[in-house]
Amino acid sequence: MADPIEKLRLKLVQQVRDVFNDASAGQKPEPPSDEALFERDTPIRMVHADLVGMMTGGIRSLLLQMLHPHALQGVLDHSNFREDMHGRLRRTAKFIAVTTFGHRDRAMAAIERVNGIHAQVTGTLPDGSSYIANDPRTLAWVHVAEAQSFLAGYMRHVRPNMPRSEQDEYYRQFAVIARALGADPVPETRAEADAIFRELRVDLRPSPEAREIANLVLNQKPEGTPPGVQAMLGGDAVAMLPPWGRSMLGLNAPGLSAIPARAATWGMGRTLRWAFRQT
């Protein structure tokens, strides 16, 4: 007789994999490789393996990225984000998985594909100036928003006392991908990341379009996601935003509502780590 607990575990794993992989397009989970860009059990692989930390961090990152006029306009002009938010988030998650866990050849091929796409993403801003997606400074903001957010999600949900040396190593590892994508400047320590984050903040602007996308990200339920999960993850991501970021996006500080969201994401994280045998 099949073990009901094991049956439940496998069902949960499959449900999560279905959210992140489009089976109709033949997508499968990225198998971890011993010949990846990064060794097993190193900071980047630990951080990027935690689903709840990556989901809450990913939402926080996207909200911050949309405050950059160039990144925002690229999304508005060259994607169908409004109609296929889940597809865009799924592609981003796939890129992170391949470059972190996949064989180094597959990782570099994925980076080259993204570089090719970025080279074709050009256009004009509302003020008449031009933009291009492979601008090093724009890519630097996208990267530092991602790196800070993913690490913040991991430390919030998994290892609040993660040693500073391991945090620095995480930035050094993630810098390999950022530089291959053309970002500049790129931090290699937490202190450098904090400094670059402050430096690039002057490039950010509030806008109705950024608020529209924030509303979509926080309120549009991806296909296959259980009821309430998006609100829970979104609420936790908003709580992790700096106050000025919430203000620019027209978002309220969660207040007492952050307590149940934090408790729910904590419980969800424990369940998923059990299901994927990460505990």
Image (cartoon, rainbow, N blue to C red):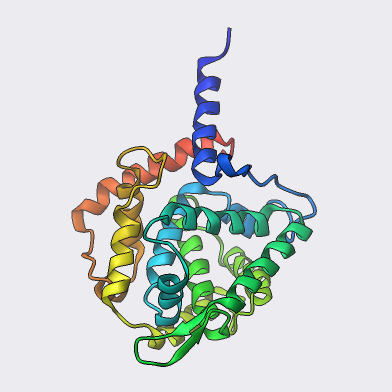
| Residue 140 picture location, percent across and down | 54, 79
Residue at image location 35% in from the left, 91% down from the top:
127
Q: Taking 172 as reference, is 2 above or below it?
A: above
Residue drawn at point x = 23 percent, y = 70 percent: 250
> With 59 as the anchor, is 190 left or right in this view?
right
Q: Position of residue 73 (x, y in %)?
A: 41, 77
Camera-side residue of 269 and 180: 180
Q: Residue at x 45, y 43 (%)?
A: 269
Vertical arrangement, residue 25 with respect to residue 141, above or below: above
Residue 242 visible in the shown view: yes
Residue 160 in view, yes or no: no
Q: Position of residue 67 (x, y in %)?
A: 37, 76
Task: Please name whichever residue, 88 or 177, is drawn nearer the observer in this view of the structure.
Answer: 88
Q: Quadrant of residue 247?
A: bottom left
Give left or right: position of 215 versus 144. Answer: left
Q: Is residue 241 above or below residue 103?
A: below
Q: Position of residue 84 (x, y in %)?
A: 42, 55
Q: Nearer the viewer, residue 163 or 234?
A: 234
**In which image quadrant can residue 227 be found?**
top left
Residue in the foreground of this view, choosing between 110 and 24: 24
